[in-house]
């Protein structure tokens, strides 16, 4: 009897240690592709065509350099757009979807806009980032209303430190905290889920043992 209990606890401890191992490895599993130290940098970039081979016509509408803000695993890009009135939509990848970039500053008179987006943690900045853009040019005789796929191609080698971001965004750090909180909630729910699974396994084992006993 005690042997059974003993092996059951060993079994329990084994399962528990596997889950702990997974939990401990979690930060490194989710670890980012970030190779740049925390800070604010100028970074050169180009907008490439849908095939990501040539420089796109769109390149001229994005001012250089962009600003790269690195805070732990979080990387934000801020950049200015000229002829902003024609750029009616701009989406970058986030969590398996394409998400509209954030407008930080808009100057309608100068037709300029400063936008910001988060670089996905697992994205290596040396690889181009896909952008979906919606362009409407209303000054042409023919209708110009197109959706294009292009790529931001950042040159990590070009980075140089700068004192402040293009636009000071108080919530950039808060957003980092938010996502850290999300990670903590995720870890807690994984942990609680594991405990429930273990308890269910133990309960089933117990019932099976009882049944075996009563059959004997
Ligand atoms: C007066 C304004 C504009 C004119 C006359 C114009 C004209 C054109 C023309 C003729 C093409 C086809 C060229 C080809 O396929 O080789 C084209 C493609 C394209 N245009 Fe525009 N365009 C204008 C504004 C814009 C703006 C504001 C953007 C984005 C910010 C943009 C982004 C693109 C893109 C991404 C392509 C696809 C080819 C590529 O990536 O190079 N265009 N445009």
Image (cartoon, grey):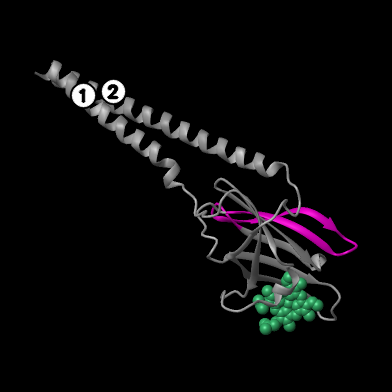
Asked which secondary structure carries label 2, the reply is helix
Q: Nearer the viewer, mark 1 or mark 2?
A: 1
Q: Which residues are magenta?
A: 93-119
Main secondary structure type of the part rendered in magenta: strand
Establish if 136 lies above or below 97. Answer: below
Q: Which residue is mark 1?
A: 8
Residue at position x 52%, y 38% in the image = 183
Query: Is residue 115 highlighted in magenta?
Result: yes
Asked which secondary structure carries label 1, the reply is helix
Name the side, left or right, on which 151 lies relative to 103: left
Task: Tell me which numbered mark, 1 or 2, is placed earlier along the sequence.
Answer: 1
Query: Is residue 100 highlighted in magenta?
Result: yes
Q: Which mark is residue 203?
A: 2
Closer to the camera in the image, 111 or 12 = 111
Picture coordinates of residue 44, whole percent (x, y): 65, 66
**Could you tell me how far apart the alpha carbons at marks 1 and 2 are, in whole angstroms?**
11 Å
Picture coordinates of residue 158, whole percent (x, y): 61, 65
Establish if 16 lies above or below 30. Answer: above
């Amino acid at each position: 009897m005690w042997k059974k209990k003993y092996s059951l606890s060993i079994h329990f401890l084994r399962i528990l240690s596997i889950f702990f191992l997974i939990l401990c490895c979690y930060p490194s599993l989710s670890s980012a592709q970030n190779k740049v130290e925390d800070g604010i940098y100028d970074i050169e970039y180009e907008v490439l065509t849908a095939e990501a081979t040539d420089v796109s016509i769109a390149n001229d509408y994005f001012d250089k350099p962009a600003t790269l803000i690195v805070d732990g695993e979080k990387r934000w890009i801020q950049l200015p757009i000229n002829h902003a009135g024609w750029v009616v939509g701009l989406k970058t990848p986030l969590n398996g979807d394409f998400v509209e970039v954030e407008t930080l500053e808009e100057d309608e008179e100068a037709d300029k806009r400063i936008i910001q987006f988060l670089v996905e943690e697992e994205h290596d900045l040396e690889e181009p980032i896909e952008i979906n853009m919606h362009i409407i040019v209303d000054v042409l005789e023919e209708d110009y209303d197109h959706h294009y796929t292009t790529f931001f191609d950042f040159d990590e080698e070009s980075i140089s430190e700068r004192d402040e971001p293009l636009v000071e965004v108080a919530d950039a750090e808060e957003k980092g905290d938010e996502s850290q909180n999300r990670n903590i909630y995720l870890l807690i729910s994984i942990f609680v889920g594991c405990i429930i699974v273990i308890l269910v396994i133990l309960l089933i084992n117990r019932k099976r043992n009882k049944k075996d006993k009563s059959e004997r």
